[in-house]
Amino acid sequence: MARVLSELRVLVHELALNDDVVEVLLPSGRPHDIEGQLWDYKKHLRVAGGATEEERRRNKAAWGELFKDVVAFHNAYGGYIVFGVADRGRDRITGCTEEFDCGDFNKQLQSYTEANIECLFRFIAVPGRPTETQIALLLIPRRQTGVAPVRFRKEGPIKANGAHLGRAALPRRPHGALADGPAHPVRSARRRPVRLRGRTADGGGNGRGPYGRHGWAASGCC
């Protein structure tokens, strides 16, 4: 699992949204048995709006929870949220087809936090699956060193229980810590992760910089 974390830190630094990310998060087309400091699996991607009042309320609450997760990732080490992957079940890859306006999402997040967190989004096919099976990746960049942790405004987004995420709430990833503090270990996975070719823990390998061919300019990004 340490190898997975090392590779994901490099990918987050490079703002990667490509097959390399899928190779690490879905080795051999299968999700890891756990979630860690740098990734989270979600079965559904809720979109803003809805046909009924109840649907709009449910979707707004889901976005509130997603805002919370994004702030937690950003304050720690950055990371990826993978949509279209269930937490449990025999076949956990359910796929994702919902439309998602990443630019609008970033604007709403900024209105709640007064911070500019430029998340990136892309649909991508799952190796070994039919071509119509795709997942969605949301990349959350890491908070820069020396920048204060992001907090919600007093009237933050609505959670599923109807409460607001207030300014005092400073969420963290369950297996991690703020980027300026120590990281906690992650439980081992039963399957061995795939190692990326030519990539090292310090970001070296093949002379690729933080905005190399794995950067945000890949097609399909928002």
Image (tube, rainbow, N blue to C red):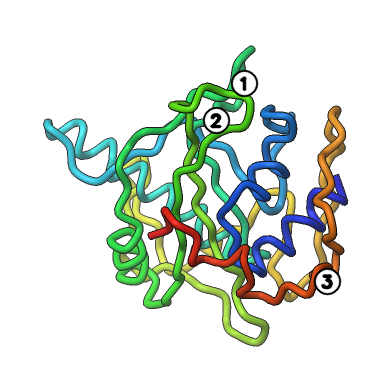
Q: Residues within 10 Å of mark 1 (few under 14, many from 20)?
A: few
At label 1, the amino acid type is Arg
The residue that appears at 33% across and 59% down in the rendered structure is 105
Q: Position of residue 118 (x, y in %)?
A: 45, 70
Which residue extends farthest top? Answer: 90
Q: Position of residue 29 (x, y in %)?
A: 67, 29
Task: Examine the image and state in which quarter residue 176 appears.
Answer: bottom right
Q: Earlier in the sequence, mark 3 or mark 1?
A: 1
The residue that appears at 32% across and 63% down in the rendered structure is 103
Label 2 SS: loop
Q: Nearer the viewer, residue 26 or 155?
A: 26
Q: Nearer the viewer, residue 13 or 86?
A: 13
The numbered mark at residue 204 is 3
Count every numbered label the image shows and give the total.
Answer: 3
Q: Earlier in the sequence, mark 3 or mark 2?
A: 2
Q: Which residue is mark 1?
A: 88
The residue that appears at 74% across and 64% down in the rendered structure is 10
Label 3 SS: loop
Which residue extends farthest bottom? Answer: 146
The numbered mark at residue 44 is none
Q: Is residue 68 left or right of residue 62?
A: right
* CA distance for labels 2 and 1: 9 Å
At label 2, the amino acid type is Val
Q: Is residue 190 left or right of residue 177?
A: right
**Up-down relation of residue 151 to residue 79 (above or below):** below
Q: Which residue is mark 2?
A: 85
The residue that appears at 46% across and 63% down in the rendered structure is 119
At label 3, the amino acid type is Gly
* CA distance for labels 3 and 1: 35 Å
Label 1 SS: loop
Q: Position of residue 32 (x, y in %)?
A: 73, 33
